[in-house]
Image: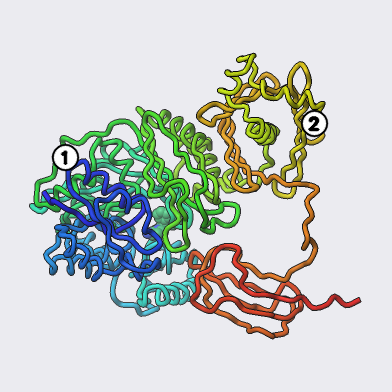
Amino acid sequence: MFGKVLIANRGEIACRVIRTCRRLGIATVAVCSEADRNAAHVEMADEAVLLGPAPARDSYLKADLILKAARDTGAQAIHPGYGFLSENDAFAEACAAAGVVFIGPPADAIRAMGSKSAAKRIMEKAGVPLVPGYHGEDQDPELLLSEARRIGWPVLIKATAGGGGKGMRAVHSEAEFPAALAGAKREAAASFGDDRVLIEKYLVTPRHIEIQVFADQSGQAVYLFERDCSIQRRHQKVVEEAPAPGMDEATRRAMGEAAVKAAQAIGYVGAGTVEFIVDASPEGKGAFYFMEMNTRLQVEHPVTEAITGQDLVDWQLQVADGRPLPLAQDELTINGHAIEVRLYAEDPDGDFLPATGRLAHLVPPMGPGVRVDSGVRAGDEVSIHYDPMIAKLIVHGADRDEAIRRLQAALADYEVAGLKTNLAFLRRVAAHPAFAAAELDTRFIERHRTDLLPGPVPVSDRVLATAALHRLLVLAGATAERAAASSDPHSPWAIADGWRMNAVSHVDDHFRDGEREIAVRVHFHAAGYGVSVGEGPERPVRATIEADGRMIVDLDGHRFTARVAEVGTRVHVWAAGEHAAIDRFDPFAFTGDEGAGGGRLVAPMPGKVVQVLTEAGAAVTKGTPLIVLEAMKMEHTIAAPVDGTVEAVHYAAGDLVEDGAELIAFAPAEAKA
Ligand code: MV4
């Protein structure tokens, strides 16, 4: 076995690989960018090598620097993780040329799956089922149209070089075809520098079911069953589970064997995933069709690990070292049910744009059947340079119901503050009746959008009361120990006597929840304490802060535990599964520039400036485009809010900007009387 392995990646997958290496006694070398010098994966590894500046193309994508790092540290093998160089055939070849083992498939196998149409032709020959379609080289528009007619409407036009849904167009009738073809070709040319397309029968509500395969260097291959990854948003997976609900043994075996055939058809070695779409329509009868093969270990591999009890990174290392597969097909079994959700730094209420910032507070859940794979710690930055995934939460239960209950409990316990995340969205998915009923297909999120994205929900009185009580308890130093040390050890409010002596009858706290402003008053009486929220009645309350920081609140005779984290004026409250963030404010504070109006044009999200359309000194009218930002591959134009003058432009094309950065100093024209 290798004595030392270099991990050419970052974040959770680098940490994940290091963990198995450590268990196997293999030394590890991390690589990092300047932004990641103190990252978790660097801290975990035995050694680390700095590659270069933060942008991936200057660091994690620098194949030559990574190979040099392997040589310099004496690493015998490189694990590429996923993303970055993991499916780069030239890198796999360069490793071989440098005498370093690439922990992944042979370069030829990566190449064979790179072209979607060539991959489909290979699979067709191998007898793997394909969606009826046309995957030929001839791109004559007349021929493509006649093929579409033969296939029957609706059809889907896809980029041959594609992936991730780019260059994809659904066409429902012959009349739409020419425009859709032109659009798909344009997008394919722009995205991949290759405008070739293929045409397929369009399945309107498919399920995405993929098979984990493994092959060793002697040509043996097995499947480690399936994962259902149907719950996606714009081709980004959100929930993955194994096994697929409703899968019968015969279909499982047929899909598994087809996937093994696919792997063997291209001389595959190592961990791979064969993606199928399954026709979930009543007429479809659950037929499955090959989509593409991913020639890497996937993000969602932990659900397969959970149900098989295997460590897939361990398997990868064994196979890369030339050993046989650890288990044969008939030794692999499914145990229980596993579900993974991806926690992202993003804003579900703001079109899911990625969020950046410091993870001011981060407490992952724990417990039986709960696994969290993460590459960040409390205090770490989530930057604009890399994938915004914060962690993967994986739960395992005896059956799907138990897994869902564990998922709901773990999501309720998850504490994150400092930046926007999709946590509340995940909680709603996990709690949705259609999820419990396993009504899964790729339109799940779209179909349940109003349930899953209800918009801002007003925070509860419970949260507001807890936030106000927290401040009082902290100010009073009324910890459980203080109370215990006082003359009345049972009074959590022992310290509060002072207030009564000073004849203070109440204190007020003020919070903003979106547009709403709410005053919370805590009342002090000889008999005990009360709290009133807004115009609401006073309700009796007791509260303590335990030694572990947890609050115990008894409001109106209803006792619950809560956690509070204060980040500046922002108060985060987790109370019995509810998480809310509100802003404390001082109603008497002077806010100097209130009502000044405009003056600054700020980046509405982190991104890159792609174009500056104006210059300092320019007089512009309302609506004039001034600067174009790109974020998540979409362009956003910032326009003049009113007539006025551009005083300064703070960024140039190519600059990266943080959320809230001032882009342009802008002077609104004097309002005419
Ligand atoms: C399809 C399809 C329906 N019919 N092909 C999307 C990305 C690419 N890898 C394949 N995709 C699809 N191909 C036919 N013939 C629907 C999708 C699709 C999809 C597939 C898997 C998971 C999520 C999806 C979301 C939208 C569309």
- Which quadrant holds the C terminus? bottom right
* Residue carrying label 2: 536
- Toward the right, the furthest residue is 673
Marking on residue 618: none
Q: Is 76 left, or right, of 631 in this rendering?
A: left
- 216 horizontally vs 132: left or right: left
**Three-letter residue code for mark 1:** Gln
According to the picture, the residue beneath numbered tag 1 turns out to be 329
Nearer to the camera, 334 or 129: 334
In the visual, does 630 lie left or right of 214? right
> What amino acid is at disc 2?
Gly
Q: Position of residue 28 (x, y in %)?
A: 22, 52
Placement of 82 over or under 403, stated as above or below: below
Local SS, label 1: helix
Q: Residue 123: image x %, image y %?
A: 23, 59
Q: Nearer the viewer, residue 67 or 84?
A: 67
Residue occupying image coordinates x 57% and y 48%: 449
Left or right position of 510 against 154: right
Q: Residues within 10 Å of mark 2 (few under 14, many from 20)?
A: few
Query: Image point 13% across, 45% down: which residue?
Result: 325
Question: At 75% across and 24% down in the image, what residue appears?
Answer: 530
